[in-house]
Image: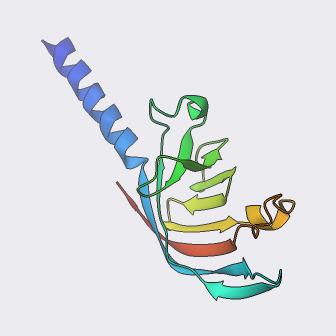
C-alpha cells in the first residue's frame, strides 16, 4: 500500500512540475518597422502578442528533442525552439522564426522578429515581412 501511495505521489509531483514549466507571456510594448510599397522602411506600432512557452506536444514531432518551444497563442505553428532548458539564473533562450528570451524569476520576456529584413526580395514582388521587438510579462500556467 505504501508503494502505491508513493508512486501516486511521485506521479502527482511530476505532473505539477511539468505544468509549472509552461508560461503564458503577454507583450506590453511592441515596436517595429514595415516596408512600404516604395521599398522604404518606416517605424510603426504593432498589436501585442500572446505567447505560450511549453514542452513540445506529441503533435510537434520534429521539435520533441527540444526542452521548450514557443507558439503564438491560438496558433499551432512553432515560432521558436529552445536548445537548452532554463539556466540556474532562470534564463531561457530560444531561436527560430523569432528570438525569444524569458526569465522565470522576473517573469519578464523579450521577443524579436528580424526574419523579414534579412530575407532576399520575394520573386512575386511582394514586400518583405515586418520586423519588430516586443517586451512583456509572463505567468506560469
Between 21 and 49, the residue placed more toward the observer is 49
In the picture, measured across the screen, residue 56 lies left or right of residue 100, that is left
Vertical comparison of 78 with 49: above or below: above
Relative to 116, say whether 29 is above or below. Answer: below
Quadrant hosting residue 85: top right
Which residue of the protein is positioned furthest toward the left in this rendering? 1
Camera-side residue: 76 or 107? Answer: 76
- Res 65 visible: no
- Position of the N terminus, as image quadrant, is top left
Residue shown at 75% from the left, 67% from the top = 126
Determine which quarter of the picture holds residue 45: bottom right
Q: Dividing the image into 4 quarters, which one contains the C terminus?
A: bottom left
Q: Is residue 83 visible?
A: yes
Is residue 31 shown left or right of residue 52? right
Determine whether 81 is above or below 26 in the image.
Answer: above
The spot of residue 28 in percent (x, y) is 49, 79
Residue 17 in the image, given as x and y percentages of width and height: 37, 40
Residue at position x 65%, y 54% in the image: 93
Q: Residue furthest right?
A: 120
Residue reaching furthest front?
124
Residue 15 in the image, given as x and y percentages of width and height: 32, 35
Tag count in the figure? 0
Direction from residue 68 to residue 140 in the image, left or right: left
Q: How is the image coloured?
A: rainbow
Of 141 and 49, the residue lying toward us: 49
Q: Which residue is depicted at the point 42% across and 49% down?
A: 22
Q: Is residue 92 above or below residue 116?
A: above
Q: Position of residue 139 (x, y in %)?
A: 39, 63
Amino acid at each position: 500500500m505504501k508503494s502505491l501511495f508513493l508512486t501516486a505521489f511521485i506521479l502527482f509531483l511530476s505532473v505539477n512540475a511539468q505544468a509549472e514549466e509552461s508560461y503564458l507571456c503577454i507583450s506590453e510594448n511592441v515596436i517595429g518597422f514595415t516596408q512600404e510599397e516604395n521599398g522604404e522602411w518606416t517605424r510603426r506600432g504593432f498589436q501585442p502578442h500572446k505567447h505560450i512557452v511549453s514542452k513540445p506536444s506529441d503533435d510537434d514531432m520534429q521539435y520533441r528533442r527540444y526542452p521548450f518551444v514557443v507558439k503564438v497563442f491560438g496558433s499551432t505553428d512553432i515560432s521558436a525552439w529552445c536548445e537548452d532548458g532554463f539556466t540556474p539564473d532562470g534564463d531561457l533562450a530560444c531561436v527560430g522564426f523569432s528570438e525569444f528570451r524569458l526569465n522565470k524569476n522576473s517573469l519578464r520576456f523579450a521577443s524579436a522578429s528580424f526574419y523579414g529584413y534579412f530575407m532576399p526580395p520575394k520573386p512575386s514582388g511582394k514586400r518583405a515581412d515586418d520586423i519588430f521587438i516586443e517586451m512583456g510579462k509572463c505567468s506560469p500556467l
